[in-house]
Amino acid sequence: MVGGLALRLCHLHSHDPEKKLWQALLEPEFTRQYWFEVWHECQWNPGAPWRLMLPDGRVGYSGEVLEIEPQRRLVLSWRAEFNPEWRAEGYSRVTFELEPQPHSVKLSVIHEIDRPDSQLVGPLS
């Protein structure tokens, strides 16, 4: 926790090129492989709504594309739809940042919400 903010940060290093890692974040056929059978529904433009669909067809999470810089940065507002307690917390913010390294790409995922007691950010991060 930082001040009144619940914050989680994780880093992943991938030997895949940036383009492939970016595809894994956005394209349904890749997210199903890497994100436990879930997929995004989105047009991937600033201000566009997005939904993360669960394998049974329910909406798991929803929000809006806040920022997008292809193959570099994606920022989403993020709200749980399937869990009433998490949904009541409102929207959090998730930032995905890709940073080229000499022999890999560093993916940083930052999940934050202005609630120090968040039950949403802790379990997801």
Image: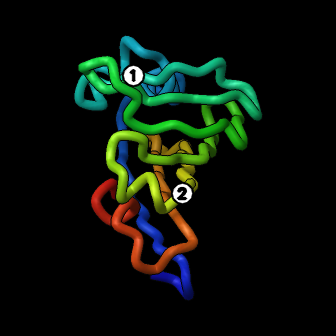
Could you say where residue 22 lies in the image, as x and y percent from the top left?
51, 28
Q: Evaluate if marks 1 and 2 touch, with contact meaning CB atoms under 8 Å apart.
A: no
Left or right of residue 37: residue 53: right
Q: Amino acid at mark 1?
A: Trp
Name the side, left or right, on which 95 lies relative to 32.
Answer: right
Crowd tier of the residue under label 2, counting other residues whose Cα lies within 10 Å: few below 14, some 14–19, many 20 or above: some
Q: Give the secondary structure at mark 2.
A: loop
Residue ranking furthest to the bottom: 3
27 relative to 35 in the view: left or right: right
Residue appearing at x 40%, y 29% in the figure: 59
Q: Which residue is mark 2?
A: 90
Total count of labels: 2
Q: Which residue is mark 1?
A: 39
What amino acid does circle 2 point to? Answer: Gly
Select label 1 or label 2 by which is in front. Answer: 2
Q: Residue furthest top?
A: 29
Q: Position of residue 96 (x, y in %)?
A: 53, 46
Residue appearing at x 36%, y 38% in the figure: 14
> Which color scheme does this rendered protein use?
rainbow
- Say which of 48 and 16 sits in front: 48
Q: Residue at x 66, y 36 (%)?
A: 65
